[in-house]
Image (tube, coloured by chain):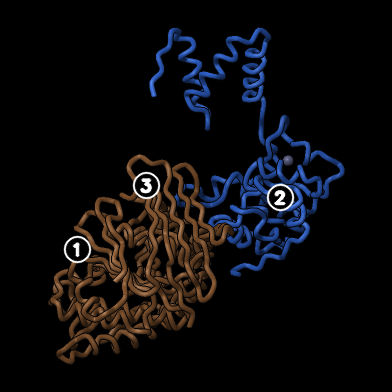
């Protein structure tokens, strides 16, 4: 098992950080400060360096500080015995550039899988919404980190899907459908869908196994749980689905079936888990799921991923905080970054445990203090 | 940015020039001032050549390349092999391949790729013309010089479908021509090499 750790990072014009350089502990880092001071931004910059994009924003345009024309992140990351220097330079006017040891990566997919990372954040409860987007995103984010070619397939499938929908929509308006164009798009989606389905299926099987094991540990009341993959491709090929639904698709002006409808189903005590489940259930659910994702990445890549826990200690009582810390401090987890609003709470617990850690105090886009305990 | 002009002639000229792609107001002003200060007939020459261009340029009725008469120089040339056609998106691709001086076949300029999202269907491209050329029977091979984008591939797939009942051979130029895939940005040697090392196209792969 290879261990990775971010040694240091420099943030330049990154969100509310002007120009900051800071070093990290190889195991545990705790970022503290009041809300809105930049804790999440700092954690997001770690994700950016590892994956090549933000976890919390949908586009780079939200990252530039004020009216700054560019931002950059430079990080030294140790992988086993060797150090890698990762540079992200993003300008408003040109394409962003991402390099490792000064070797430029042309595609994001070249970068994926080198520095695996798992993020736990408050908006994870979106995973329980009615729409399946977030749940597919979880699967896709995980598999892309394990297999860069998967990302390419997803991008291709989604692009072809958009073209297919656009063709169906405009044909509906025109009252004429060029079926050869439709087939040219559809037939290229068939093999992609098959591959994506197979990969999602085998990944989610592994994920469920880990999820169920973790949930048992977290839930006190011995609740039963399961997580299963739902896909129309389980029963029919995409070709069969497209043929079956052609008339419907023509009327709707969009593609009604396919792997873009795939979903994950979470069952706790024989009931589908809802967003308004109890706080305890939600926290157990999210932590189990993310730790399961962590295990999957670790097994597939042979690298201990970085774990980010953004604001998850909020609203937890002292005992649950201690339990959670106990878990992430174990040997089976690599480098950890935690954020918390209280400056004393987590450092206090860690001191009692005589646990080594780096505490970073963030205040208005500045590192007010950084010390080891 | 707003500019204050002392002359409305100057203002109009700047407005007109800045309608061109990648010409901003500042560059337009610089060009206009340059022409004002020029003592030769430059302005007249430029204006005249643009009008002549617009009034006279036409499309080759065979290959859809830009031409002065209804058949372009490449199609007219005695020394070109007529049994091999390289299918490209636009005129710039033809020029990029011609610059290599390594290709002796003729061309077909599609005018783009199929993309329902952008409202471009087969009828908006010179696809029927290509089909007619192939069906006349003198073509042995079509080399697909389209960019290796998802839409470029859809277009190649479409072409292979509508030509499946002819016995024309379809081949692809080797992938990874250049970063971004656009022929016009690749260097001459790379283009020449990728045309020579082309591979047969198998639909669905
Ligand atoms: Zn011609």
Q: Residue at x 53, y 75 (%)?
A: A81
Same subunit, labels 2 and 3: the answer reads no
Disc number placed over residue B133 in the picture, else none: 2
Q: Along the horizontal axis of the image, is A38 left or right of B186?
A: left
Considering only vertical position in the picture, is A14 above or below A327?
above
State which quadrant residue B54 falls in. top right
Q: Which residue in the structure is indicated by mark 3?
A: A64
Residue extending furthest toward the bottom: A222
Q: Nearer the viewer, residue A204 or B33?
A: B33
Ligand 1 quarter of the rendering: top right
Name the secondary structure under disc 2. Answer: helix
Q: Earlier in the sequence, mark 3 or mark 1?
A: 3
Q: Quadrant of the C terminus of chain B?
A: bottom right
Considering only vertical position in the picture, is A222 above or below A17?
below
- Pair 2/3: label in front: 3
Name the secondary structure under disc 3. Answer: loop
- Which chain letter goes with mark 1? A
Task: Compute the Cα span from label 1 to label 2.
Answer: 72 Å
Task: Compute the Cα span from label 3 to label 1.
Answer: 24 Å
Q: Chain letter for brown?
A: A
Q: Which residue in the structure is indicated by mark 1?
A: A341
């Amino acid at each position: 098992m290879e261990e990775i750790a971010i040694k240091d990072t420099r943030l330049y014009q990154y969100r509310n950080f002007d120009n900051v350089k800071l070093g990290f502990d190889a195991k545990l880092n705790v970022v503290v400060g009041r809300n809105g001071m930049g804790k999440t931004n700092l954690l997001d910059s770690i994700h950016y360096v590892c994956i090549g994009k933000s976890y919390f924003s949908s586009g780079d345009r939200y990252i530039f500080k004020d009216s700054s024309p560019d931002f950059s992140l430079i990080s030294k990351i140790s992988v086993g015995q060797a150090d890698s220097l990762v540079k992200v330079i993003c300008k408003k006017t040109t394409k962003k550039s991402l390099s490792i040891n000064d070797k430029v990566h042309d595609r994001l997919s070249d970068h994926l899988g080198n520095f695996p990372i798992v993020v736990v954040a408050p908006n994870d409860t979106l995973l329980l919404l009615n729409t399946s987007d977030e749940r597919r995103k979880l699967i896709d984010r995980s598999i892309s980190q394990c297999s860069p070619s998967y990302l390419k397939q997803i991008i291709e499938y989604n692009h072809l899907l958009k073209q297919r929908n656009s063709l169906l929509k405009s044909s509906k308006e025109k009252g004429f459908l060029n079926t050869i164009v439709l087939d040219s798009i559809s037939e290229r989606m068939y093999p992609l869908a098959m591959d994506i389905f197979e990969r999602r299926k085998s990944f989610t099987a592994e994920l469920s196994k880990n999820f169920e094991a973790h949930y048992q540990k977290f839930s006190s009341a011995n609740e039963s749980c399961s997580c299963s993959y739902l896909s129309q491709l389980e029963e029919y090929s995409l070709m069969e689905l497209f043929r079956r639904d052609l008339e419907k698709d023509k009327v709707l002006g969009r593609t009604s079936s396919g792997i873009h409808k795939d979903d994950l189903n979470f069952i706790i005590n024989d009931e589908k888990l809802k967003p308004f489940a109890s706080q305890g259930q939600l926290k157990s659910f999210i932590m189990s799921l993310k730790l399961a994702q962590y295990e999957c990445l670790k097994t597939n890549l042979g690298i201990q991923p970085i774990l980010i826990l953004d604001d998850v200690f909020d609203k937890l009582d002292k005992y649950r905080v201690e339990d959670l810390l106990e878990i992430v401090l174990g040997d089976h987890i690599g480098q950890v970054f935690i954020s918390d609003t209280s400056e004393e709470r987590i450092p206090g617990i860690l001191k009692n445990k005589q646990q080594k850690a780096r505490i970073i105090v963030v205040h208005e886009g500045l590192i007010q203090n950084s010390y080891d305990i | 940015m707003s500019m204050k002009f002392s002359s409305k002639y100057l203002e109009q000229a700047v407005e007109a020039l800045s309608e061109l792609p990648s010409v901003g107001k500042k560059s337009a002003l610089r060009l206009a001032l340059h022409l004002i200060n020029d003592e030769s007939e430059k302005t007249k020459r430029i204006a005249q050549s643009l009008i002549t261009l617009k009034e006279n340029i036409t499309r080759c009725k065979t290959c859809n390349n830009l031409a002065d008469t209804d058949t372009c120089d490449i199609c007219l040339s005695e020394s070109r092999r007529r049994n091999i056609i390289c299918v490209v998106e636009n005129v710039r691709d033809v020029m990029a391949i011609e610059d290599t001086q390594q290709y002796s076949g003729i061309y077909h300029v599609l005018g783009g790729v199929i993309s329902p999202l952008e409202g471009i269907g087969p009828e908006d491209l010179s696809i029927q013309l290509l089909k007619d050329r192939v069906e006349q029977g003198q073509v042995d091979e079509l080399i697909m010089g389209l960019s290796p984008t998802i839409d470029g591939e859809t277009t190649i797939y479409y072409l292979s479908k509508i030509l499946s009942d002819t016995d024309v051979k379809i081949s692809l130029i080797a992938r990874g021509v250049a970063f971004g895939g656009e022929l016009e940005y690749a260097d001459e040697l790379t283009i020449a090499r990728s045309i020579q090392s082309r591979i047969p196209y198998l639909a669905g792969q």
